[in-house]
Image: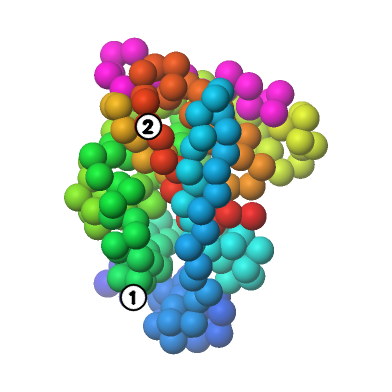
Amino acid sequence: MLKVLKDILFPINCLSCNSHGGKYLCRNCLGNLNIKLNLKKIRVTNAEILVVTFFNYQDKIISEIIKRLKYGYETEITSTIQDILDIVYINYFSTISRLLVDRTVISVPLYPLKKRKRGFNQADIISRIICNKFGLSLLAGGLQKIKNTGAQADLEKAQRENNLKDCFSWDKKLTAPVKVLLVDDVFTTGTTMRECVKVLQQNGVKDILIFVFASG
Ligand SMILES: [Zn+2]
């Protein structure tokens, strides 16, 4: 009953063709998504870290989905991301699964106040889906965001780096895993990722692979 009411009051249309089906991406448009495995490397304190992604942030539909990841309804977002990652899983299982062996999944955290306001962390949504698909476990609470950095998008690169400096930490009550899959929704300048990687390295993580939903 509640769902019926919600559909009437807040209808969700396909972000691509506008058809009404209660999903951000209908079956048809889902099939037309532009998926391409993209591997790049970033260097953080002498280690080369591989970044895996399947979508370009500049793609109009993908950037709309990312916006919904931040400001949409959790259930519908989860279902849309699940549908998209199902296709990725089917097409790239053999390539990705071998990279994921023995990894513990860690999401890039939000500042607690921000997470409370939003109701969820969008990186956690992606992480949970990956864990279910590949039989990995999620370690929550280890990596923490300890500084409220505000909106990064409005800042210049140098300001961005400065703003994010030392904004993550590791909860020493938890033992850091040796092999980690670090997950986030987007990768733009990579500043956030570098800061997270540094903290993981400082706390004993030896092998880090990054997965992002989309890269800019
Ligand atoms: Zn559609």
Residue 68 pos. (x, y %):
53, 60
Residue 47 pos. (x, y %):
50, 29
As drawn, the residue found furthest toward the left would be: 135
Would you call the spot at circle 1 few (<14 residues within 10 Å), some (14-19), or many (20 or more)? few
Residue 186 - label: none
- Which residue in the protein does label 2 denote? 207
Q: CA distance from mark 2 to mark 1?
A: 47 Å
Q: Quadrant of the N terminus?
A: bottom left
Front residue (pair 151, 116):
151
Above or below residue 138? Residue 188 is below
Q: Tell me which label, 2 or 1, sits earlier in the chain.
A: 1
Q: Are marks 2 and 1 in contact (CB under 8 Å)?
A: no
Looking at the image, which residue is at 57% across and 39% down?
42
**Helix, strand or loop status at disc 2:** strand
Color theme of the render: rainbow
Residue 68 in view: no
The region drawn magenta spans 161-176
Q: Amino acid at mark 1?
A: Val
Residue 4 - label: 1
Would you call the spot at circle 2 few (<14 residues within 10 Å), some (14-19), or many (20 or more)? some
Q: Amino acid at mark 2?
A: Asp
Looking at the image, which residue is at 53% across and 63% down?
55
Front residue (pair 99, 162):
99
Residue 185 pos. (x, y %):
50, 50
Asked if ligand 1 lies within 8 A of label 1, the reply is no
Q: Quadrant of the C terminus?
A: bottom right
- Please give the count of numbered marks on the rendered protein: 2
Residue 169 pos. (x, y %):
47, 19
Residue 74 in view: yes
